[in-house]
Image: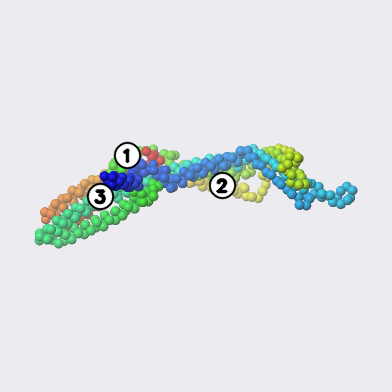
Amino acid sequence: MKRYLIILGLLQAFIMHSQEGIKSFSLDEAINYALEHNRTAKKASLDILSAEKQKWETTTIGLPQISGSIDYQNNIERQFGAVDFDGNGITDFGAKQSIIAGIQATQLLFDGSYIVGLQSAKVFLEISKNAKEKTDLEVRKAVINAYGNVLLAEESVNILERNVAVLSKNLDETSKIYENGLGEEENVEQLQITLSSVKSNLNNTKRLKTIGYQMLNITIGLPIDVKLTLTDNLENLTKENIVLGLLQADESIENNIDYRIAQNDKKSKELLVKLERSKFLPTLNTFINANYIGYNEKFRFLENEQPWVPTSSFGVSLKIPIFNFSGKQAATQRAKINLEKSIEDLNETKQQLQLEITSAKSDYQFSIEEYENKKQNLSLAERIEQKNQTKFFEGIASSFDLRQAQTQLYSSQQEYLQAMLDVINKKAALETVLNTIN
């Protein structure tokens, strides 16, 4: 009894360990997981954090700056010398050693480039956030595509396995009929050709399924060897993704992320023009210093008897650019040219997005129509194949007729599966361009 409990405990531990290595995802769960763990999405989040730090770094330039200093000097040879008033030769001035300990506070009062820098830091942060949003949209679309490809492979394997089973049964029955002298050898050979082709397709599809799972793992941010269980199925997802109201969605491009990114580029070019212009403006700073100075012939600065001389000062510094040959005027003109280019890029983006939205709606509508069409075609192909199979075993139809009906059925099966996947993918593409994620 004790041995039985030990074995049972080990078995339960093994099952629990095995289950820990398997992750189960619906499509929505896979998308949410990817937005947090996909490597590209994680790097985009880090870019936002970096932009926030850069914004603060730029802001601190305009805050009061305080610094301290300690300067020690040992005059190996006295720095100052002169002839004394009696004409007795050189007399040394100054102490052998000195220390100056001070603190300085500075404050920027006005600098045009600093003001532009603050605006640029804000725009840079906005650019990073928009880049993150675009990344999330692309990751979402990639997960949908990868998830759908796996479901397509799973359904294809199931259908092909059923086809192999039916063909194997037909071949067995036809072989027995031929062996009894009631059929032709060509009938057997035709079925063998068909079965061989379907088996080859099945083996290839199984390999593609393995690759599809690995691709999905990479897309959502999991190690490539983690086993996944997908809880959604292709047919249900297709029905859920048929949303006819989406075809009537507002085609305004203001919410499109690519349009906002183009606007960010225009803003950044405007700021570059401001930056070049700001270089013609004066800069104004203020400062206050406080120092303690000590002199001594020997290093006795740490003793209480050491005398210290305090000094302090306050001042304002104004720098006015008057004339130089640094090419500031040319730099400003070049910045204006780049701004004009960004305006043209923004207008081009508008045109492209309007065309892209129209095209995406058309593709989505066509995918829905094709889905309904392929669904009907599959039903017809199944009936035709079944009729020809009955006729074949009754001796009315030839093996060639049966093979042709079977080939048509297998083609209709794959077209139907692909049509379902297209509905899912085309909806994701339309939602991405409209930025209307539900």
Q: Position of residue 104 (x, y in %)?
A: 67, 40
First along the sequence among labels 1 and 3: 3
Q: Residue at x 44, y 39 (%)?
A: 254
> Label 3's element?
helix
x, y percentage for residue 109? 64, 38
Q: Is residue 418 visible?
A: no
Q: Secondary structure at mark 2?
A: helix
> Depth check: 289 or 157 in front?
289
Q: Is residue 389 visible?
A: yes
Distance, label 1 to label 2, CA atoms, is 47 Å
Which sits earlier in the primary sequence, circle 1 or circle 2? 1
Q: Which residue is mark 1?
A: 243
Q: Residue furthest right?
A: 86
Dot 1: few (<14), some (14–19), or many (≥20) neighbours within 10 Å? some
Q: In the rendered structure, are the residues bearing label 1 and label 2 in contact, judged by CB atoms less than 8 Å apart?
A: no
- Residue 314 appears in which quarter of the rendering? top right
Q: Is residue 196 above or below residue 131?
A: below
Side of 290 where 92 appears, left or right: right
* Drawn side of residue 403 relative to residue 306, left or right: left
Instruction: Name the outermost residue toward the left.
Output: 181
Answer with the quarter of the image where residue 101 lies.
top right
